[in-house]
Image (cartoon, helix red, strand yellow):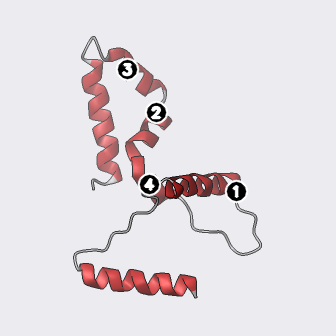
Amino acid sequence: MPGIATLFQTLELTTERMQGDPQLSRFADVIKAHQGYAHLGALGSSLGDFLPADPLPGVQPPNYVRIWKNIFQVLADRNRRALRVHLGADVKAGLAKLGAALRGALA
């Protein structure tokens, strides 16, 4: 999976190439006019990397936290990937660490 900087660079290079093509230049103009949405789209499933963990008990989470929790619930309900886990090069050790973390979270 490419890193976030790579995704943003790919977006920039693609937009530049589109700008040089008469059939695609209007799409490039829209992308440039809406950079925030373009970067959000470039992130795709990596967006979850930017979402904060649950707030402290008794603290009301901001609206966007509740919204994203609902979005992830919809993804899970439709059998879509809602979580990505990087196990590292040593898959067995990564699975053991993940298992321990899950057991601790569920205890």
Distance from disc 2 to disc 4, alpha carbons, whole Å, reads: 27 Å
Q: Position of residue 58 (x, y in %)?
A: 77, 73
Mark 4 and mark 1 lie on one chain; the one further toward the N terminus is 1
Q: Position of residue 11 (x, y in %)?
A: 32, 36
Q: Secondary structure at mark 3?
A: helix
Tag of residue 27? 3
Distance from disc 3 to disc 2, alpha carbons, whole Å, reads: 12 Å
Distance from disc 4 to disc 1, alpha carbons, whole Å, reads: 25 Å
Which residue does the numbered mark 1 point to in the structure image? 62
Above or below, 79 against 87 in this view is above
Which residue does the numbered mark 4 point to in the structure image? 80
Whether label 4 touches label 1, CB < 8 Å: no
Q: Quadrant of residue 70?
A: bottom right
Residue at screen point 57% across, 68% down: 53
Mark 1 and mark 2 lie on one chain; the one further toward the N terminus is 2
Badge 4, how many Cα within 10 Å: few under 14, some, many 20+? few
Residue at screen point 23% across, 80% down: 90
Residue at screen point 38% across, 84% down: 97
Above or below, 68 against 104 in this view is above
Q: Position of residue 80 (x, y in %)?
A: 44, 54
Mark 2 and mark 4 lie on one chain; the one further toward the N terminus is 2
Distance from disc 3 to disc 4, alpha carbons, whole Å, reads: 29 Å
Q: Nearer the viewer, mark 3 or mark 4?
A: 4
Mark 3 and mark 2 lie on one chain; the one further toward the N terminus is 3
Which residue does the numbered mark 2 point to in the structure image? 35
